[in-house]
Image (tube, rainbow, N blue to C red):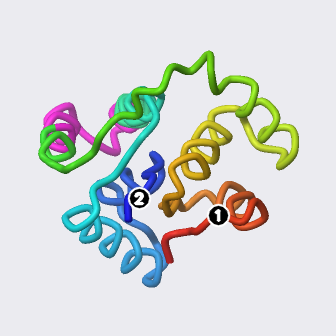
Amino acid sequence: MTVILDASAALAWLFGRDDKTERKRADAMLDALGEDGALVPVLWHSEICNALVVAERRKVASEAQSADFLTRLGALPIETDSAPMPARRDIALQLARRFTLSVYDAVYLELALRSDARLASFDRQLVAAMRKAGGRVFE
């Protein structure tokens, strides 16, 4: 089954997680991509790049580490959703209102629900919204 991968899940592969259980879950998410592949909204690419440039500015990562990470991400079976956003905009806005999410997070929720896919995320509010909406979460 396809996994909807949010930025927090992908960035865990570079920055790690403090909690041991979350580290194991991040590794399991990465392993699952080999079997199922992942689907991401267009905004995922901007979120990843923004997190990398912020990490560089804070001296948490170097440009070389960012480049290497992007190369490794590019080698993974991650597809970008091709459905035009204007057609989904109203749904994302409704989901954001209903679950008190940012519209950015609601885009992930909408994609996961539309795709009947598991959501891979470390964003607790987004995961809770996915569960309330009746969707599946990567455990």
Magenta-colored span: 55-70
Q: CA distance from mark 2 to mark 1?
A: 12 Å
SS of the residue under disc 2: strand
| Label 1 crowd bin: few (<14), some (14–19), many (20+), radius 10 Å | some
Q: Main SS of the magenta segment?
A: helix
Q: Please report the residue visible at 36 percent of the width from the left and 52 percent of the height from the top.
A: 10
Mark 2 near mark 1, Cβ–Cβ under 8 Å?
Answer: no
Please report whichever mark, 2 or 1, sits nearer to the chain's N-terminal start: 2
Q: Splitting the image into 4 quarters, where does residue 127 fall? A: bottom right
Is 136 on the left-hand or right-hand side of 47? Answer: right
SS of the residue under disc 1: loop
Q: Position of residue 105 (x, y in %)?
A: 64, 41
In this view, 16 is above or below 69: below
Q: Position of residue 110 (x, y in %)?
A: 63, 42
Q: Please report the residue visible at 50 percent of the width from the left and 63 percent of the height from the top.
A: 118
In this view, 99 is above or below 2: above
Q: Amino acid type of disc 2? A: Val
Q: Amino acid type of disc 1? A: Gly
Q: Position of residue 88 (x, y in %)?
A: 64, 27
Which residue is label 2 attached to?
3
Verify whether residue 129 appears in magenta.
no
Q: Quadrant of the N terminus?
A: bottom left
Which residue is label 1 attached to?
135
Most distant residue in the bottom direction: 21
Q: Please report the residue visible at 71 percent of the width from the left and 67 percent of the height from the top.
A: 131
